[in-house]
Image (cartoon, rainbow, N blue to C red):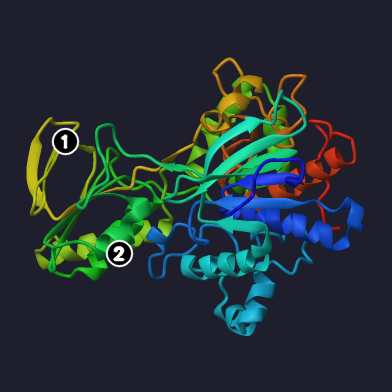
Amino acid sequence: MNETVNETTPVYDVVGVGFGPANLALAIAIEEYNEQAAPAERLTAVFLEKQPNFGWHRGMLLPDATMQVSFLKDLATMRNPCSRFGFVPYLHDRGRLVDFINHKMLFPTREEFHDYLQWAADGVDHMVRYGLEVTAIRPAGAAGPVVEVDVAAVGEAEAVTYRARNLVIGTGLVPRLPEGVESSERLWHSSEFLHRLAALPAAAPRRFVVAGAGQSAAEIADHLHRTYEGAEVVAVHTRYGYSPADDSPYANRIFDPEAVDLYHGAEPSVRRTLMDYHRNTNYGVVDMDLIEELYRRSYQEKVRGEQRLRILGVTRLTEVEEGPDGVRVQVRNLATGETETMEADAVVYATGYSEPDPGRLLGALGAACARDEDGRLRVRRDYRVETAPGMEAGIYLMGGTEHSHGITANLLSMAAVRAGEICDSLVAGRRGGRRSDRRKSVAVTG
């Protein structure tokens, strides 16, 4: 950690901030491009990650929980079907290809997919610096062709600076809690569920309250109900019940690469309409088989004269008070106004995530970035932020582009194609050209 900024400090073609699946897919695209490019044409890249090692939603790696996307929508296959970083090569390397085929599964478990991501990350670990937190980003001198990124080892103050011609921000989504609620020993966001559950003081919990109506909320209610046979699980949400995800073939076209072209080229009003039409493909919805399983279990409990799984629809948490031995919770029926007070060992908020504003991280660079009438960054089709004429360095976004690129902006389903498009743009920029906003990117395979 002795890098200092001087004339000998290397200038990378790209510095990536964050190393989740999105920037991992980009690292793979760059790796495959470099393997076939002439030495003088290769891209130099480094990715900076705050975590000490690779990890993806570890707090929600529930036993038997499956992905909501096909294994073919991995980090590389849709960009390059022959990639050695695809899920099928991973299975072959792990000695499970035949077993997986016999399993007749389109959707692997989350646990297995995390192992795949780790396997892929190990293949490009020469590009990654773990345990580093970005503390500042600024132009190198006047706004121009180079940006500087200051980082410090987690828990340390001494800074190290990286320099790059392009910046790719892939810091991921931010867990969202209700206003006034902070994560604690007994109040959890779903992203930290398994970690908090393992540290729960109560040896034999009596009651859990789960707030939320999406996939994570349903999976957590299911897991708690199956795991703690002596505990009551109370699911609280403002709907009548869980709503099914629309994963029908035509609705799923919104996740196709071509849908990004249409969305980006549409007028803002059309974009809003498309998002409203198809929110039920991804947001606040649950797989139908899990809905039916929870309903079946709840009904069987009524038959037996017990009710350990309670689904409180049209209801909201109105008071939550944490004490040394539990949480006092008040819920209110939105239709009748009736309230109920109960004691719980923990409250889990499966209340989703928010897109971060990359402008906060960009610091002084933010002033050179163009914004739309709603204050959001203007983003070209190749995921590059529109900047002032004097700003030559490129700023690319891996996420935070739902307003410009549609519902797939933060999803795994487009990770491979999105990475290929950004890699193409980086290559074109290095060669002195810029790809047109509206031109469809050609996948980088070499």
With 380 as the anchor, is 178 left or right in this view? left
Residue 401, picture quadrant = top right
Q: Give the secondary structure at mark 1.
A: strand
Q: Is residue 296 above or below residue 263?
A: below
The residue drawn where x is 60% and y is 70% is: 119
Seen in the picture, residue 335 relative to 189 is either above or below; the reply is: above
The residue type indicated by label 1 comes to: Asn
Residue drawn at 61 percent across, 64 percent down: 121
Of the pair 94 and 9, the residue shown nearer to us:
9
Q: Tell me which label, 1 or 2, sits earlier in the chain.
A: 2
Q: Amino acid at mark 2?
A: His
Residue tagged 1: 333
Residue at 61% x, 39% y is 149
Q: Quadrant of the C terminus?
A: bottom right
Q: Is residue 98 visible?
A: yes
Which of the pair 337/367 is nearer the observer?
367
The one of 341 and 245 positioned closer to us in this rendering: 341
Residue 78 visible, this orientation = no
Q: Quadrant of the N terminus?
A: bottom right
Q: Which quarter of the picture shows residue 354?
A: top left
Q: Residue at x 62, y 68 (%)?
A: 122
Mark toward the viewer: 1 or 2: 2
Residue with the most extreme top position? 373
Picture disc at residue 274: none
**Is 304 above or below relative to 424?**
below
Number of disc labels: 2
Image spot of residue 166 (x, y percent)? 72, 39
**Local crowd size for mark 2, using a 10 Å CA cut-off: few (<14), some (14–19), many (≥20):** some
In the picture of the structure, the residue carrying the numbered disc 2 is 223
Mark 2 residue element: helix
* In this rendering, position of residue 174 left or right of residue 25: left
